[in-house]
Structure formats: C-alpha cells, structure tokens
Image: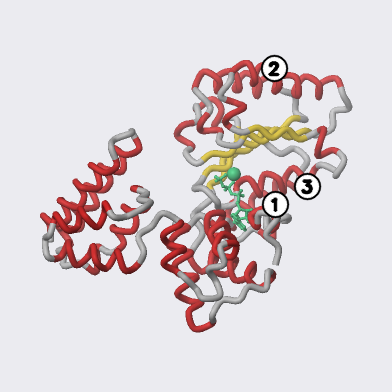
C-alpha cells in the first residue's frame, strides 16, 4: 500500500481506454487524433470527470517524451488571471514556435472559465494569430463563462458526471491494486457513502478513499468518521435532525446544527435534500423546498452568512412538513 503519491495521480488515466464513461467525447477525439490537423479544443463539464486527464492524453499522443517539456505549456487560472502573464509567457511560447521547426505544440489552459473577460480577449487575439502548429486545449466547468469568439474557434466536448456504478467500479479497481482490506459485509455501504460524498466527482471519490486509508478508518470501517471529516453529518446526527424536523422542533434542530464541528453548508444542503423523499412531504412541498434550496445555494455562493441560510432552510422544511 503506497500513500506517498496521491492516488489521483497514480491512477490518472494514461490512454483513451483508461477513461471511463465520456464515450461521446472520447470516440470523437479519437477521430481527431488520427488526423494531423486537429482543431483547438474546449473540454467542459463538472469537476473530476476526466478533462485534464484527456487533455494530457492528447498531448502525449502527438509529443514524444522529450518534447513534453518543451512543446507543452500547462497553465492554470492563477497564471492566466494576470494579463501580463498571458501577454508575456504565452506569447513567448507561441512566438518561439514560429521560428522553430514547426512541430506541434500544445497549450493546456485549466480553469479557463475563471479567466477574466479582458484577459480572454487578449487570449482570443493570440489564438487568432497563432500558427497552425499550436493547439489550445481549454478546460472549464462552465462554458457560458467563456467568450463567444473563443468558443467559435474551438471544437467543444462536453464531459458528463460519472455514473455511480462507474465511480464505484474505479474505486474497487484501486482498492484491489492497493490491496485494501474493506470488511466485505459492509463494503457496499462503504462504496455507496464514498460515492455520496464524491457527488459524482471521481477525483473527490479517490481522494476520500485515500484519506480513509491514511487515517486508518478502513479496517474497523468508521463510516461516520469518514462522513465527518468530509464535511457531512454523520448518520446519527442526521437521524436526530430528521426527528427534530419531523416534530417541528426548530430550537432542537438549531442546536443540532450548532453542535456540528465542521459544517460545510453546500454539503449539508446536498445531504438534506437527499432525505426529502423519506420525510413526510407532499410532492408540492418538495418542489417548494427544492426551489428554496436553489435560492439559498445561490445566496451562499454570493457570500451570504451560511449559518443564517441554513437556519432559514430548517425553518422552511419545518413549515412544509
Ligand atoms: N473519466 C475518468 N476516467 C478515469 N479516471 C477519471 C475520470 N475522471 C476522473 N478520473 C480520476 O480523477 C482524477 C481527476 O481527473 P481529471 O483531473 O482529469 O478531472 P478534471 O475533469 O480535469 O477535473 P477538474 O474540473 O476538477 O479539473 C484523475 O486522476 C483520475 O484518477
Ligand atoms: Mg482538471
């Protein structure tokens, strides 16, 4: 069992066939890769679905090992938010390629949706002027934050959330390789909870698995501890909260929330909305609550006080029960 290398790196897909799911994107990319004239690319989709891995696979298809240092430029958002960086480093890389041998070069721009509009304009001009041997691969979670003139110069591939079975299958594959000992009578529960924690993000799933091993939580399988350190309510606390909500006890439910050491509001919202079907709610009430959840999720993303928003949610649930 090796803990030194992050498993997300150790088990990063190396070939197209290692990429699970994403068959539409991968099948089409395979066609592009066969021709020499590939377009610029945008990969868009949720976190941990294989975008970065696929971009690296493509670069490696075209570049020999020794070229990976010279012909591949990987930038992330913190580099690219600075317009001077884009103007200098990126332009340099692009210009150098003009005078050299004309071999293929790749620029991978991670988190491209976080690049400010003005910098995107500068980037667009660079993409426009760049010669045919430079290929841009932009990675993003939200394509609507990328300006149209860039989108229209790229082939867009959508990566989708990985289905539960595929995430669990990949976790089992890693568990097998790492010779993990997961008590067999509870392994299904364990994988289900890791999937729940991951929210469909395979990176998070793999990291959670590795963390559980590092903290020695596997052999006696402490799922509650895994939930807690991942910023979720443990099962017992969740049960107590459900009881308090069902008896419309706003004081008690508030106390339960306050007693939680690490409360991650986004996780909490996800966890609580999963239990709606088991609460005594009409479908109309569920619709109301889901609409409200959309609202507070937005407020939290805009910096509203998390405790207040969660209290508001609890009050809303009690009102609808
Ligand atoms: N489709 C997939 N097939 C196999 N492994 C995957 C897949 N998606 C993610 N992984 C695993 O998760 C890790 C992270 O994947 P990757 O960096 O490619 O995700 P990403 O889509 O770029 O995410 P982000 O948007 O957060 O950057 C990889 O190292 C790999 O182990
Ligand atoms: Mg990525």
Relative vertical location of residue 250 with respect to residue 219 in this rendering, above or below: above
Q: Nearer the viewer, residue 172 or 55?
A: 172
Please name which of the two marks, 2 or 3, marks the residue nearer to the observer: 2
Choose mark 1 or mark 2, whichever is in front.
2
Q: Residues within 10 Å of mark 3 (few under 14, many from 20)?
A: few
Q: Which residue is mark 2?
A: 88
Left or right of 24 on screen, residue 107: right
Do the numbered discs 2 and 3 sit on residues whose CB atoms are within 8 Å? no
- Distance, label 3 to label 1, CA atoms, is 10 Å
Q: How is the image coloured?
A: secondary structure
User: Can you tell me whether the CB of the residue at mark 1 lies under 8 Å from the nearest atom of ligand 1?
Assistant: no
Instruction: For marks 1 and 2, give the CA distance.
Output: 33 Å
Q: Is residue 218 left or right of residue 109?
A: left
Name the side, left or right, on which 291 lies relative to 136: left
Q: Could you tell which of marks 1 and 2 lies nearer the N-terminus?
A: 1
Which residue matches tag 3?
61
Q: Give the residue pinned by disc 1.
A: 30
Image quadrant of ligand 2 equals top right
Q: Residues within 10 Å of mark 1 (few under 14, many from 20)?
A: few
First in sequence: mark 2 vs mark 3 = 3
Q: Provide the secondary structure element on which disc 2 rests.
A: helix
Residue shown at 24% from the left, 57% from the top? 256
Q: Which residue is depicted at the point 50% across and 27% down? A: 148
Total labels: the figure holds: 3
For marks 2 and 3, give the CA distance: 28 Å
Please state the horizontal and vertical placement of residue 27, each as a whole percent of the image. Answer: 64, 55
Pointer 3 with pointer 1, Cβ within 8 A:
no
């Amino acid at each position: 069992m090796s803990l030194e290398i992050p498993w997300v790196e150790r088990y990063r897909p190396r070939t197209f066939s290692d990429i699970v799911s994403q068959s539409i994107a991968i099948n089409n990319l395979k066609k592009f890769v066969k021709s020499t004239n590939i377009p610029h690319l945008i990969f868009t989709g949720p976190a941990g679905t294989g975008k970065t891995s696929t971009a690296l696979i493509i670069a490696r298809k075209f570049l020999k090992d020794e070229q990976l240092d010279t012909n591949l430029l990987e930038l992330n958002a913190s580099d690219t938010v600075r317009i001077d960086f884009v103007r200098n480093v990126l332009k340099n890389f692009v210009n150098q390629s003009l005078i050299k041998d004309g071999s293929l070069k790749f620029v991978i721009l991670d988190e491209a949706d976080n690049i400010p509009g003005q910098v995107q304009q500068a980037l667009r001009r660079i993409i426009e002027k760049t010669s045919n041997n430079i290929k841009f691969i932009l990675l993003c979670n939200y394509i609507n934050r990328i300006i149209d003139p860039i989108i229209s110069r790229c082939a867009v591939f959508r990566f989708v959330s990985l289905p539960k079975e595929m995430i669990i299958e990949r976790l089992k594959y890693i568990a097998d390789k790492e010779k993990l000992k997961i008590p067999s009578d509870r392994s299904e529960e364990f994988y289900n909870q890791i999937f729940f924690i991951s929210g469909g993000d395979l990176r998070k799933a793999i990291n959670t698995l590795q963390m559980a091993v590092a903290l020695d939580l596997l052999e006696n399988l402490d799922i509650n501890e895994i939930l807690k350190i991942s910023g979720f309510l443990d099962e017992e606390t969740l049960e107590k909260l459900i009881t308090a909500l069902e008896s419309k006890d706003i004081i008690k439910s508030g106390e339960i929330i306050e007693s939680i050491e690490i409360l991650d509001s986004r996780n909490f919202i996800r966890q609580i909305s999963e239990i709606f079907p088991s609460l005594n709610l009409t479908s109309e009430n569920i619709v109301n609550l889901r609409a409200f959840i959309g609202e507070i999720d937005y407020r939290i993303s805009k910096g509203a006080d998390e405790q207040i928003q969660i209290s508001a949610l609890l009050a809303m649930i009690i009102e609808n029960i």
